[in-house]
């Protein structure tokens, strides 16, 4: 009797274990599938286009004749928007983190933190629309020569989107700094700002840097804002007022367009996606590595 | 009592609605060691933290009454707590050096307070004052975490001395240390009273009787007995003091 029971229990335990493992394997298999399909189509692309052209040519015109396949303008566009976004998000994110961890009372923090987290939940298409219909007109009012689609507007709005991410991760790092270090500084006649800048930030610096890197990686992969607001013109420029195209926006354009399956244009999407994948993957690895190192300090 | 440096008048401290200290009045003698003793939760650390306004940093803490430092109330509205802490330094229960070099730890206070003299000689002088110079003079730029617990605590004392305070508050400074490190700190405290006034919270009654000139015994937020250490330990007036020092509770 008792043996039978425990047998049944071990079977149900086993089934549950298998189901849970299956749930895990879905995402792992999907990742593997993505990499395999990327690599497959990318190799097809590089049979037609040389690696040298891909990495050194200064034009990206897969839909024109003659077609040029230099990824530089797309990478430049991506980094232009990303740098603007980080320039907006890093100082504002750090400032909010300092406010929340060092200045705000428990009550204020209880109100502000959920509001910041709501910002994370806003769909990126809404941000893109906001950039195009609100920020761009303001920029064009100040600087009338600005293109309708431009890197600046998309970059600013993407920066706003990234503030809660940087703020929340940096605040976690700052809150993890032991209270005893703050007390030591206060007892040495430090002001609140001196405690924040000279004790808390140096002690939390790896967590803060990691938040920058993760935000950078998120910005590189962001798609909707740049598709809507930054334009569709591959453009090797550092002028933020011009229309550009990012890697992600190019992928959207081709996938939604009429590139026939198996054609070189179609395959170029995979080559670009593969570069994007490698970029964000390495940034994520660096970011997580820094976070892990930082955890070992305390 | 000779010169009075700190005069506490009707001090009451609350954390939210919990009363931690009830209407305390006492005076602290200059260039003497005053020990605050009593069981956990008796309010001795709260009193210590009231003497340089460290309680201001605890949300929900409220203070009424006065603490006169050389006749001036440190809780007066015009007084900046940051300036109070320049005169009245503090060393904590657990050694809490900054994750910086030994030199940077000692130089921290003078630097943020705009010290204009020779930082190198001030650091040396402070480390000598804390009896640590000989042990660290060849590795001033090593991280402070490489030091032993006792050395870290003397570094924290050196760090406090670098601001040349008039009063040094010590909150159970030896509770995390072994007996040998404890002895070194006790010797150091006795040397330091030549230059400054020391108030020390301690759990250890032997420590109080070894080093303190005056001892105050607290129980449940009240000051039960206060006087010369020898008197408090040999002929306590209050029955509760006697019970505590003879180990009947606590």
Image (spheres, rainbow, N blue to C red):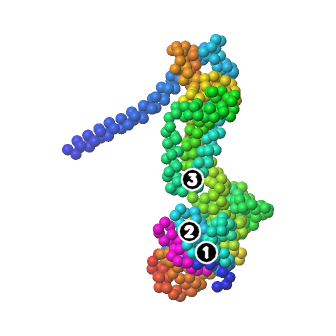
Residue drawn at (29%, 39%), measured in percent from left and top? Answer: A12
What segment is highlighted magenta in the picture?
B10-27
Above or below for A30 versus A9: above
Pinpoint residue A206: horizontal percent, then vertical percent: 61, 46
Which residue lies under the disc numbered 2?
A: B175
User: Can you see residue A230?
Assistant: yes
Numbered disc 3: what chain? A
Residue A116 at x, y percent in the picture: 53, 45
**Is A7 inside the magenta-drawn segment?**
no
Residue A69 percent coordinates (x, y): 64, 18
Number of labelled discs?
3
3D distance between C-alphas at marks 1 and 2: 27 Å
Residue of label 1:
B67
Image quadrant in which the N terminus of chain B is located: bottom right
Vertical relation: B209 (above or below) A93: below
Dot 2 lies on which element?
Answer: loop
């Amino acid at each position: 009797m008792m043996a039978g029971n425990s047998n049944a229990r071990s079977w149900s335990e086993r089934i549950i274990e298998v189901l849970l493992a299956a749930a895990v394997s879905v995402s792992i298999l999907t990742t593997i599938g993505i990499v395999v399909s990327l690599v497959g189509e990318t190799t097809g692309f590089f049979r037609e286009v040389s690696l040298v052209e891909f990495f050194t040519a200064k034009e990206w015109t897969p839909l024109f004749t003659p077609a040029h396949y230099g990824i530089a303008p797309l990478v430049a566009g991506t980094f232009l928007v990303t740098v603007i976004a980080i320039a907006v998000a890093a100082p504002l994110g750090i400032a909010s983190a300092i406010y929340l961890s060092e200045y705000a009372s428990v009550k204020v923090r209880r109100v502000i933190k959920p509001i910041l987290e709501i910002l994370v939940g806003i769909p990126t298409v809404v941000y893109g629309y906001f950039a195009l219909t609100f920020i761009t007109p303001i920029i064009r009012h100040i600087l009338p020569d600005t293109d309708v689609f431009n890197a600046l507007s998309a970059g600013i709005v993407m920066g706003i989107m990234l503030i809660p991410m940087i703020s929340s991760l940096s605040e976690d790092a700052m809150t993890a700094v032991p209270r005893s270090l703050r007390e030591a500084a206060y007892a040495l006649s430090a002001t609140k700002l001196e405690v924040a800048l000279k004790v808390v930030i140096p002690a939390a610096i790896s967590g803060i840097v990691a938040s920058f890197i993760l935000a950078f990686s998120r910005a590189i992969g962001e798609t909707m804002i740049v598709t809507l607001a930054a334009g569709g013109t591959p453009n090797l420029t550092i002028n933020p007022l011009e229309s550009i195209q990012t890697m992600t926006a190019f992928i959207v354009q081709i996938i939604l367009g009429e590139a026939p399956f198996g054609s070189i244009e179609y395959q170029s999407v995979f080559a670009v996606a593969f570069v994007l994948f490698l970029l964000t993957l390495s940034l994520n690895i660096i970011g997580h590595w820094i976070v892990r190192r930082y955890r070992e300090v305390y | 009592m000779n010169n009075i440096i700190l005069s506490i008048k009707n001090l009451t401290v609350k954390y939210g609605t919990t009363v931690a200290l009830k209407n305390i009045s006492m005076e602290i003698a200059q260039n003497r060691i005053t020990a605050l003793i009593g069981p956990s939760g008796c309010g001795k650390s709260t009193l210590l933290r009231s003497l340089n306004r460290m309680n201001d940093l605890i949300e929900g803490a409220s203070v009424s009454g006065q603490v006169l430092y050389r006749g001036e109330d440190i809780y007066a509205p015009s007084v900046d707590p940051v300036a109070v802490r320049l005169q009245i330094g503090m060393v904590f229960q657990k050694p809490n050096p900054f994750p910086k070099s030994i030199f940077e730890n000692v130089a921290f206070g003078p630097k943020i307070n705009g010290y204009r003299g020779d930082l190198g000689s001030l650091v040396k002088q402070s480390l000598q004052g804390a009896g640590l110079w000989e042990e660290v003079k060849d590795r001033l730029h090593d991280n402070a975490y490489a030091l032993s617990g006792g050395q870290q605590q003397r570094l924290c004392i050196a760090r406090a001395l670098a601001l040349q305070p008039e009063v040094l508050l010590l909150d159970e400074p030896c509770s995390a240390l072994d007996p040998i490190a404890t002895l070194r700190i006790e010797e150091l405290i006795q040397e330091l009273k030549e230059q400054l006034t020391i108030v020390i919270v301690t759990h250890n009654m032997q420590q109080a009787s070894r080093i303190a000139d005056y001892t105050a015994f607290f129980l449940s937020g009240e000051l039960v007995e206060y006087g010369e250490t020898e008197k408090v330990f040999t002929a306590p007036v209050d029955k509760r003091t006697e019970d505590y020092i003879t180990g009947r509770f606590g």
